[in-house]
Amino acid sequence: MSDFSNYLQGQVTKRKIEKGLEILKKENPDELRRKLKNVDINEVLQKMDEYDKTRLNELGIDVAELRSKVSEADIQKARQVLGSDGEAIIRKIRDMLR
């Protein structure tokens, strides 16, 4: 049952990541800031701590595929939107994609 549970969680997580990337690529920085203004950065960091390369692989998420979808321009746009609070998030994203 654990394999099935990992599969389901992996599918949900993958869709969330893909939707986040889609929004990041399509929305302008001001709109992104507006959408993220009430997001608790510490909560985001806590959630990101649950996912490392090993966990992503367990969930059936291909890190190399994700890496190919995230450009340096995407990282810079995220940095611009998140400001100084986002540096920790950017570091975690880069670590996950290595």
Image (tube, rainbow, N blue to C red):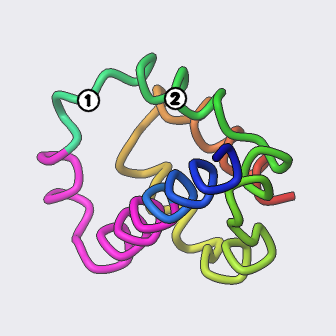
Disc ID at residue 47: 2
Which stretch appears magenta? 14-35
| Circle 2 SS class | helix
Residue 90: give x, y in percent of width and height.
62, 44
> Who's the residue at 58% across and 34% down the image?
48
Q: Quadrant of the C terminus?
A: bottom right
**What is the three-letter code of the residue carrying label 1?**
Val
Residue 27: give x, y in percent of width and height.
23, 72
Q: Which residue is mark 1?
A: 39
> Who's the residue at 57% across and 48% down the image?
5
> Who's the residue at 40% across and 24% down the image?
41
Q: Residue furthest front?
A: 1
Residue 33: give x, y in percent of width and height.
21, 47
Q: Judge the density around disc 1: few (<14), some (14-19), many (≥20) Cα neighbours within 10 Å.
A: few
Earlier-in-chain disc, 1 versus 2:
1
Main secondary structure found in the magenta portion: helix
| Circle 1 SS class | loop
Does the segment drawn in magenta span residue 94? Answer: no
Vertical comparison of 85 with 4: above or below: above
Q: Is residue 15 left or right of residue 23?
A: right
Q: CA distance from mark 1 to mark 2?
A: 12 Å
Residue 7: give x, y in percent of width and height.
60, 60
Q: Is residue 84 left or right of residue 64?
A: left
> Who's the residue at 71% across and 82% down the image?
68
Does the segment drawn in magenta span residue 15? Answer: yes
Quadrant of the rendered image containing residue 28: bottom left
